[in-house]
Amino acid sequence: MPVITVLEAIRDAMREEMRKDERVFVMGEDIGARGGVFLATDGFLSEFGEERVIDTPLAESSIAGIALGSAMSGLRPIAEIEFADFIWPTINQIVGEASKVRYGTEGKLQAPMVLRAPQGGGVRGALYHSQSVEALFAHTPGLKVVTPSTPYDAKGLLKASIRDDDPVIFLEHKRTYRLVKGEVPEEEYTIPIGKADIKKSGDDLSIITYGLMVHHCLEAAQLAASKNISVEVLDLRTVRPLDVESIIGTVEKTGKVLIVYEDNQALGIGSEVSALISEHAFEYLDAPVVRLGGPEVPAMPFSPPLENMFMIDTEKISTAINKLAEY
Amino acid sequence: MKIELPQVGESVTEGVIGRWLKNVGDKVEKYDPLVEVITDKVNMELPSPVEGVLREIIANEGDTVPMGGLIADIETKESENSPINSDTHSNLQEENIGTTGVLIKDAAPVGPTGSGGPISQDKPQPDPSIKDRPKSRYSPAVLRLAEENNIDLEQVVGTGINGRITRKDVTAFIESKPNTLESQTIVKETAASTPRQDQEKITLSPIRRMIAANMVKSATLIPQAWSEVAVDVTGMVLRRESIKESFMAKEGINITYLPFVVKAVAESLKKNPLLNSSWSEEGIILKKNINIGIAVAAPDGLVVPVIHNADLFSIAGLAGVMENLITKAKNGKLDLSEVQSGTFTLNNTGALGSVSSRPLVNHPQSAIMTTEAIVKRPIIAADAIAIRSMMNICLSFDHRVMDGAEASAFSMSVKNLLENINSETQIY
């Protein structure tokens, strides 16, 4: 199988879907002539033309609004928000409107749109190029929120998102773009939205995580193995809807759970996962459910040492693993 | 003075404490053997780094201790004379603080109710009175398992923090006592008569555990292939026979077939460097030195002393080196350096009567060879039947590192070298 990066997987997914389905088009800031700031749509303008590769003004609310309108009219837009940090003007269009289209029209209308955005820190991006936005969208029923960690997952999930009949927020961790490489089959495949994946099997404790953190957790699990601590790593892949069955499954297996996420810890995805566990798997718990999430700080600091302190890394995860294993 | 387990060699991260050679209260001279330490490479006696009195044994026999972990406390002359020991509070008072004050490095922050302050520098030790204290609350998982399996949790030994019983402790307890309820009843009912046991458990010695761990590593990490070659060693048998007595008279040691084989293996490894290498994901690491490990059945289990730079020795030299190593191995006296850095392993399974065996590669090496029993067999040579001394050599190898072609080239080289031994073969 060819080995490609997360970025290449995303580019391939969009290109293949656009070749296959005339209704699919891309729009966003700098995505045409420039090929996107991260080059996710590199070469698209020459292959698909201006009709299907639309450079938009710097106006995120319009990008989301146009995408929603065209989706309700029968097209399948992939709208790119250049950085997730600038996604907030779309809240009205996405949370206020897109999420409610199917429900509000009793199923007569649907909004098959994908809103892609690179997010996450650890890239020296400071306040406005480091945010994690999944929890705010995941709170709203009617939206699907996807957070892939590997090229294989990114490609399969993006294709599934494009074909999905409801709005999908597709959040790509920009640090994984060129950092994470993996095998991706040449044959056609999709990955169902809402299915978690055991990235490493183990039986002493479980880590539930997603996005970039999957890779730090796998590293920490490797280190733990040298101390005879067997760690299972469950990659949620989709944070809305959550794969409750897989979450409960791993808890029943190990009885100890560490939830790792880069986004703000309080009221985050981990908070919901933790609540689900205590509701559905209480009798299998052998230790308190532990969250390891972002600190109570409004934004990513500019100073590199402070950014390192802010970010969850392999070392912090290892410390949490050791403590939980000891309990 | 707190005694730490020192770093005892490459790739060793922890040791198992063996027998303590001194008791608490004993006077200890510097370099006195203090305790036996068993690592996955070797058993060793740890010499005391100081003179003093053994005050406390922190790591007990059978404990696994990481390198740098505390194992004992020895009271030295200095610590006797010094009024302060490990008491942090008095340490703090001792320091010349002055008006600017000093930062207490080891203190909890002051809390809203006035808590906080210095923390003891010693790691919290498990409270010996823990057994008498009421047990802390059990986790839901532990309670559920105990109920489902009718387990009295009072009988379960906790390995969690502060002696907490974990889910794993309960599952281990269940596994150790199949059909707890039934067996208990049966034992009670038949205690007067003679209960018959249909199985018996042998406690795992630390060495047994190490061997088991290494074998699992070999069997699970290395995709191994195997081949066997028959070697006509008539020449070698005759050559050894012809020098046996004079060698004994001159050198005082018995010459066996093994030095002949080691010589042939060392030369063949030189010609086939892939057999003297290690697999890594980044690439195959060729080892420049030819260090041949010899598997020896010692009383406690398998040990593998290493002949370093085996290619630089003559057959007589090899005989001397091996005599020394094998005697030490059998007496458990090997130094760590004598079992380290092996690049290839040789196992003389023939000594046990075997004519064919499939050895497991000694991870992280890439190949292992056995020499099998030398047996007289009728052989067809030059269209006539001859009686020749035949020996099989068996090779297991890491198929990631090499293919059958390279492995066979090695085996054939060993075969040819051994078959060419004759009355002219140089021993010195």
Image: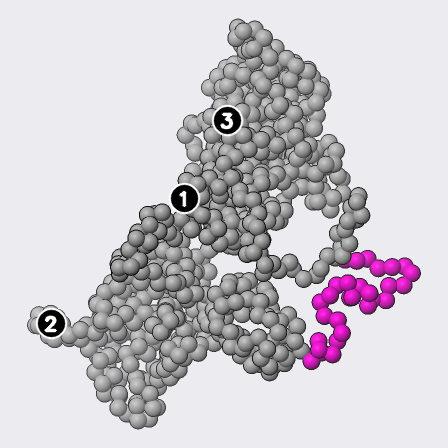
Q: Where is residue B242 in the image (x, y as percent from the top left)?
A: 23, 87
Q: Is residue B137 above or below residue B64?
A: above
Please give the residue where the numbered disc 2 appears in the rendered image: B378
Q: Which chain carries label 2?
A: B
Please tell me which residue is depicted at 34% across the width and 60% down the height of the picture: B201
Single out the mark in the foreground, 3 or 1: 1
Question: Which residue is most to the left?
Answer: B384
Is residue A97 shown in magenta? Answer: no
Single out the mark in the foreground, 3 or 2: 3
* Side of B68 relative to B225 (left or right): right
Please tell me which residue is depicted at 51% across the width and 74% down the height of the picture: B20
Please give the residue where the numbered disc 3 appears in the rendered image: A194
Label 1 to label 2: alpha-carbon separation: 66 Å
Q: Nearer the viewer, residue B56 or A238?
A: B56
The quadrant of the picture occupied by the N terminus of chain A is top left
Q: Position of residue A230 (x, y in %)?
A: 48, 48
Question: Which residue is most to the front?
Answer: B192
What residue range appears in magenta?
B77-105
Question: In this rendering, does residue A214 appear at all?
Answer: no
Question: Which residue is most to the bottom?
Answer: B249
User: How many badges with numbers are in the image?
Assistant: 3
Q: Which amino acid does label 3 sit on?
A: Gly
Please tell me which residue is depicted at 38% across the width and 53% down the height of the picture: B176
